[in-house]
Image (cartoon, rainbow, N blue to C red):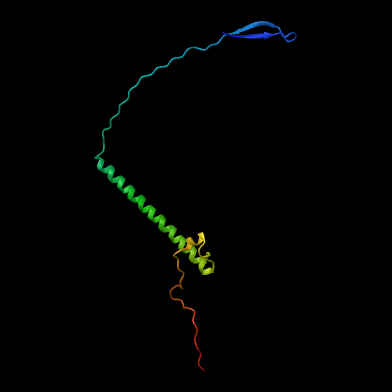
Amino acid sequence: MTKQNIYDEDTGEIKYVQETPRFEKENFNLNYGISAQFNIPLGKSPALCHEATAVNIEAQKLLIKKTKMEISLYRLEMCAKQAKLGATYKPGTPEAVTCQNIIVDIPPNQVIPHKHKIEQ
């Protein structure tokens, strides 16, 4: 039981004490348990699983190589386009590393700029 004083609003004296029941109960919980598990392969053999894992790993490695190649080709394409337009990074800047090792030459089957002497 919880006891609470009730006061008179005018005088402030205690009129009475109200008792409120509390419905708390003592609670105890105790659990015991044990667990065991065993697996029996139902397939042909674990070798098939190992082979599938090896194939999956090889596919992931090929995907990484493909992605690296695509990035490299895109970098080559963008740097070559900008160099042909006359825009390049200032040497020695961090951005210059982006187009490092890329050389822009005259495409094949085109005439290299040159001069001729005209004799009269």
**Total numbered labels:** 0
Q: In this rendering, is residue 113 above or below 75?
A: below
Name the residue furthest bottom. 120
Residue 83 horizontal/vertical position (percent):
51, 67
**Quadrant where the image shows the N terminus:** top right
Residue 18 horizontal/vertical position (percent):
63, 7
Name the residue furthest front. 92
Closer to us: 98 or 44: 98
* Rendering quarter of residue 50: top left
Q: Residue at x 32, y 25 (%)?
A: 35
Name the residue furthest right. 10
Q: In this rendering, is residue 94 above or below 111?
A: above
Q: Is residue 60 left or right of residue 8?
A: left
Q: Residue at x 26, y 43 (%)?
A: 48
Residue 44 horizontal/vertical position (percent):
24, 40
Residue 15 horizontal/vertical position (percent):
69, 5
Q: In this rendering, is residue 81 above or below 44?
A: below
Q: Residue at x 74, y 8 (%)?
A: 11
* Rendering quarter of residue 42: top left
Q: Is residue 66 left or right of residue 88?
A: left
Q: Is residue 71 left or right of residue 17?
A: left
Q: In this rendering, is residue 118 above or below 40?
A: below
Q: Residue at x 30, y 28 (%)?
A: 37
Closer to us: 16 or 77: 16
